[in-house]
Amino acid sequence: MKEIALVLLTIIIAPIIGGILTGIDRKITARMQNRFGPPILQPFYDLFKLFSKETIVVSSTQILYAFLFLVFNMVALVMFVLKMDLLLILFILAFAVTALILGAMSTNSPYSRIGAHRELICVLAYEPVLIAVIIGIYFVTGSFKINDVIKHNNFLIFELPFIFIAFTYVLTIKLRKSPFDLSTSHHAHQEIVKGITTEFAGPILGLIELGHWYELVLLLLFIGLFFAKNIIVAIIAMLLGYFLEILIDNISARLTWKIMLRLTWSIALGLALVNLIWVYIRYRVL
Amino acid sequence: MEYSYLSLIFVPIIVAGLIYLFNNSTFRKAIVFLMSAVLVVLMVFAILQGDKEIKLSHALNFALEYLITFADYFLLAVIFLIGLKLKNNLISLLAALQFVLMFVFEFRTGKLEVENVFYVDHLTFIMLMLINVIGPLISIFALSYMEEHEKHLHLEKSKQNIFFAVIMLFLGAMNGLVLSNNILWVYFFWEITTLCSFLLISHDGNEESIKNATRALLLNSIGGLSFVVGIIFMYYKSGAIALSEIIRSQDSSILMIPIAFLALAGFTKSAQFPFQSWLLGAMVAPTPVSALLHSSTMVKAGVYLILRLSPVYIDTWLSNIIAILGAFTFVAAALLAIFQTNAKRILAYSTISNLGLIIALSSVANVYSIYAAALLIILHGVSKALLFLCVGSIEQGIGSRDVEDMDGIKYRMPIVAFLTLLGSVSMLLPPFGVLITKWIAIEVSTQNIVAMLEIIVGSAFTVVFWTKFIGKILSDGKDTKRIEVFEGLRHLPLIAISILVVLVSVFMIQFTNAFVVPFFKSSFARYSGVSSRELKDLYIKDFFGFNPFVFFGILALGIIIGVLLYKLLSPKRYVRVYMSCENDDNFSFRAEKDKPVEFEFKNYCFNTFAKENNITLISNIISVALIAIMFGVILK
């Protein structure tokens, strides 16, 4: 009973938090750019407006993919809140992205297909790092279950500092922030129009937007995992992490996918590996 | 009852002879159907008998012993002659070496008799199910496929009699391979599969197919030689030539050298790096051959041998290195799959990759990894059979096996496109089983950090190439005219296999409990106190909390909600794709004077990022190095 309440609560509250965070993002971004910026509740107005629009599509299957994107993100978040297996959560998250990519590829639009392929390249870049992060957590805590991870008697960040850096690195890709906003971006400076979401409109785009909010909350919770010993520290870390992403977003220009792939595979994966090997030796060999 | 085992081997071989002699289409159809039914019945009967070691009557055993010994020498002589005819001295040399080694060995040791001729346990059942259900379904599909295939080739005289005869022989040999207890017999059937694959790959008789068949024969002959050396070492180290004795052997350390050689033989047969090229070359053969090689025969023989021997070497240095080797193939093949545009090559690399995963799982000392390895043999078998047959049908339909030409295939060939989608989704997404095995692989391989890193990177590659593949099948194309007509002989086997694909994943837990757990219990008795535990203790309720029923339930619910939502949001209006308003339709830009210019969008193949050949070369070098390390560690 308690669990069902928790699930319902998550499903209702997460998009509210996600929306507000997005609003704050836009406000901060505007201030950094010397603009006044929209009200913090603007994302909600946008969303309601999207849902009030007419459903127009290029291919009728698009609705399904947008829906799947939302559902997979929701399921991943719910699984996180229910403290289930981290690796499975990651897989589910990967399928959310897969759904979005398939949605973009189902139409014959060049912009959305380029966006889809860039998103695929992003998957290629961040997926191994994310799994490495989870393996690192496993080596330290001895479990893949969040339930056991949060019971760990120390801040994970002390034992996984490099892995944390690698994680924040790929978070930029995952949140589609500059310099890695290759596949799509919230700002109108894409050379591929709106990339992966070009062909989605009205309520269908609304579903995707909603999915993004769940995704955002989930990814921030991952940051919190590194500070799970103290809930207040964790919340501060999550907010700081988010602010850092916004800052990076505003001070950098987009890189090409080749540079992104090279950088992620060398720097982020390298950092993660170094950290992995040392926790492996510390916890498995010694 | 021992006759049911004997008939599983000899019925297909006799049928092969009949098909060869009577080159008549109606007769062929009738006998293929009849034999499929007979094989399934025999298989069910064999499974109902339970685990067994079967003795034959003395006279029969004696006769078989001689028959197989002489057939073996005959087979090696045939391969020797084929080598001469192909002007490939290396093949002849390898065959001659095997011949001489075998002869000297058997001459010196005298009579090597194994009392229990057949060793049948639950792993055998798993393989029997794969061979005798998927194999016949592929043969039935081939009946319609080959007619069409020969129409394209404009042959004067049909060569289908040879084709089907070899396929039947192949199935019989596979049954023999998994049933035999005497490792010399296993070797004999192993060599038959090598010869059959050569004949099938070279079936079309053109230059390219003969070249690729030669390569397959060469690489598999290396495996054959390694097998012989393994047998000889096995005999001199432990005096055992019966699989049942080898598995129960208490002292695994003295068996390391023979096991390493046998594992190498398994690598060649399962097309692991650096031996992968023969399986890719095999793609020139008619599609049913690819389906057969990739799903229920040939490549599965290699992983079968490694999983069979796994109880002996598991939890040793050798197992760590084999796990690293398998996982390396997993990642390298998945990476190379990203570069491909030829659908059959994508599938081939995916097979190689999955076989690597099976080998890695077989070598990790963990209950779940053994479960997953056995499961993946079946899961991969059914999905890959379906995918190859579908791609073959698409190829005959649109005249191309290039993924880039498959835009709009969902309109042109809806049935096959849907089944292809099912097959590829079953290889990637939950709730289908292949994902679960990948997940288990990551969770259990944490004790072998190198293998684990390979698997996590490979896992990302897998997502990329499957998503590309699925995206193409689901994408819109200009040509939307339906060209597919329902054809019983072709579509019913496909539908049957796709039902199996779903069933295997839905009943994964029940399947594991019924077949994999008893295999684990009987074979791994030596390992970590398994023998003291009851069969019931080893049963699983779910895989780390993953219960297929729950997930398939959620999937069904999701579909219902999806349909409702679709009704709710049902599109009011269809629009053109957005191209800065410079288009009249979805497929062309407006250029000067409003003249439409068609555009084309192809999948990224990363050719500008790295060269496929370089990656192949580097992977081959690394895998050779790893194999050298394997032998270096073992041969102190």
Image: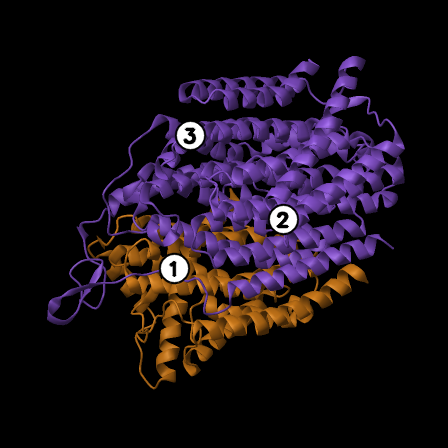
Chain colours: A orange, B purple
Identify the residue shown where x is 56% and y is 34%.
B296
Q: CA distance from mark 3 to mark 2?
A: 28 Å
A193 with respect to B594 (left or right): right
Residue under pointer 1: B603
Q: Earlier in the sequence, mark 3 or mark 2?
A: 2
Residue A23 spot, x, y in % from top left = 36, 70
The three-letter amino acid code for the residue at tag 1 is: Asn
Query: Most extreme residue toward the bottom, as rendered?
Result: A34
- Tag 1's secondary structure? loop
Task: Please give the label number shown on residue A94.
Answer: none
Task: Please give the label number shown on residue B88.
Answer: 2
Local crowd size for mark 1, using a 10 Å CA cut-off: few (<14), some (14–19), many (≥20) = many
The three-letter amino acid code for the residue at tag 2 is: Asn
Q: Nearer the viewer, residue B43 or B442?
A: B43
B104 with respect to B77 (left or right): right
- Tag 3's secondary structure? loop
Mark nearest the camera among 2 and 1 is: 2
**Do callouts 2 and 1 mark residues in contact (Cβ within 8 Å)?**
no
Q: CA distance from mark 2 to mark 1?
A: 39 Å
Mark nearest the camera among 3 and 1 is: 3
Chain that bears disc 3: B
Task: Please give the label number shown on residue B158.
Answer: 3
Q: Quadrant of the C terminus of chain B?
A: bottom right
Residue A25 spot, x, y in % from top left = 39, 73
